[in-house]
Image (tube, coloured by chain):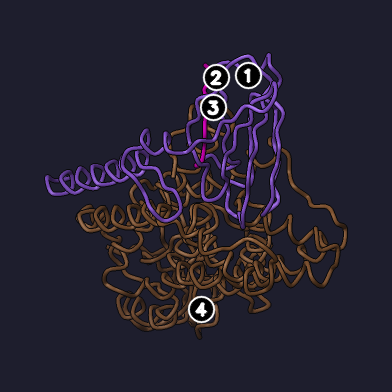
Chain colours: A brown, B purple
Amino acid sequence: MFEYIRSWKFTSFKKEKYMIMESKTYKFFVHGMHCASCILVIEEILKEVPEVREVKANLHARTVEITGKWEKNPSELAELFTSFVEKNGYTLSLEKEEKEKKWNEFIFAFPIAAALIIGFIFLQKLGLVNVISGGEVGYGAAFLIGLVASVSSCLAVVGGLALSLSAQYAKGGAGWRPQVLFHGGRLIGFFILGGIIGFLGSSFHMGQTGSVLLGGLVAAIMLVLGVNLLDVFHGIKRFQFTMPKAIGKRIMKERVIVNGITPFVVGAVTFFLPCGFTQSMQLYALSTGDFVRGAFIMLVFALGTLPVLSALSFSSVNIQEKSWSGIFFKTAGIVVIALACFNIINILVVTGIINPVFNF
Amino acid sequence: MNKSIIVSVGVAILLIGGAIAYTSNTACVGNSCSASPSQNNQKIENVKIVGERQIIEIAVKGGYIPRKTIAKTGIPTILRMKTNGTFDCSSSLMIPQLNYRKILSSSGVEDIEISASKATGVLRGLCSMGMYNFEVDFE
């Protein structure tokens, strides 16, 4: 099944002498290569393998071409190279990856997703907001409000975004770093931005158009990531959010995880996402008229949302190696798509296009 | 695609649909939910006439209570929104017909003036994320 291209590296008069030294290009199929950053990871690692002259990975064909001199046969080479990239979640083989879509995983994914969605709906009916009493907002209250917010309808926006991003990163073979960056970005972002609105005494609330656009953008991202997680339609991978290869390559060189800054920025931007709790807390933070107080109130609020949000995002770390990872990703995909639809319906309601559908 | 997937999808959709239908038809006051919203609304006397104006009181916390109010049409009206430790979406109030959009303070009272000419038909208010709403029928 393998193909190789002979490339003569030596001029003809030297050829007879160095016959055994000829370089060959081998082509392997890569299992587990899902994203543009995978190309960089694979190329960078395999370049370090002794005797490798050139590595060229192809995302579309899911192949890697490796040029070098070996006395091993291609299947031994596949094993050799696999041993280098295995820990990153990739395997090389001579056989094309069986593109089995594992429809059967949906048999489990749908009921699990349904249970989670029903759980979400009933959570909204529990009257959890009543644990928050009126009166002065201290740090304890801010933490409590954060806890309640993280299981409220804000879960559909921020939680959905956290789940879809982290599952997407996990699928690409990334470990816990992007999730830590996302939550770090969120905490630091809330602290700094909370301090700024406290200091300025005015908030950056966006008008109707701004919040609808941002909400729509988040819903669209969730929809695309959700469909990606289902692993059914391969065409949509083209819409993936990845960094340009040139930038990614430079970051990779400095031994920082690919897309290092993206999760951090996304985490900080969640400050602006349409979530009633966040907006009320911001209103409170600006009423303090003080940088330190505003910053800490928003930080404590964000800390309150952390347990649930981090449970969502860390659930997918290292899941790629598990046998039931397919079911996990499909379940996550269905839940994320459902939350995206919930957000889209709400946006249509807010813009007055349709009458209210939900009333929790 | 095989039969069991179709069955699994069908069951999932039915369950979710049922949950949405169930939650949409119940009204919650405090921690107790009742399955019949109309009964619930009658219990709450939230419209009173003071002088020439009518005042409609709506509690704002985890939604709007009552969800449906029947009021007199064609008289100057005050919509009195009462918050009490309200940090959820319902504090971010929108009334599109009045071009009203405000984040209410977490505890307090907010009066919204509705002129006699605007107090007609159905007035709908909702939170900025859209999942809580209320309506006032001017009859």
Q: Which residues are magenta?
A: B131-139
Q: Classify residue A319 as left or right of residue A115.
A: right
What is the chain letter for disc 3? B
What type is the residue that disc 2 sits on?
A: Phe
In the rendered image, is residue A58 in sight? Answer: no
Q: Do circles 4 and 3 both sit on a common chain?
A: no
Name the mark on residue A196.
Answer: none
**Rendered location of residue A25, percent (x, y):** 44, 68
Q: Residue at 52%, 22% (x, y): give it.
A: B137
The residue where tag 1 is placed is: B119
Q: Nearer the viewer, residue A140 or B52?
A: B52
Is B133 one of the magenta-colored residues?
Answer: yes
The answer to whether B55 is drawn above or below residue A142 in the figure is above
What type is the residue that disc 3 sits on?
A: Val
Q: In whole angstroms, how far apart are the C-alphas of marks 2 and 4?
A: 80 Å
What is the chain letter for disc 4? A
Q: Nearer the viewer, residue A163 or B34?
A: B34
**Rendered location of residue B4, percent (x, y):** 13, 49
What type is the residue that disc 1 sits on?
A: Ala
The residue where tag 4 is placed is: A52
Give the structural element (helix, strand or loop) at label 1.
loop
The residue where tag 2 is placed is: B138
Q: In whole angstroms, how far apart are the C-alphas of marks 2 and 1?
A: 6 Å
Q: Residue furthest bottom?
A: A50
The residue where tag 3 is placed is: B136
Q: Nearer the viewer, mark 4 or mark 3?
A: 3
Give the structural element (helix, strand or loop) at label 2.
strand
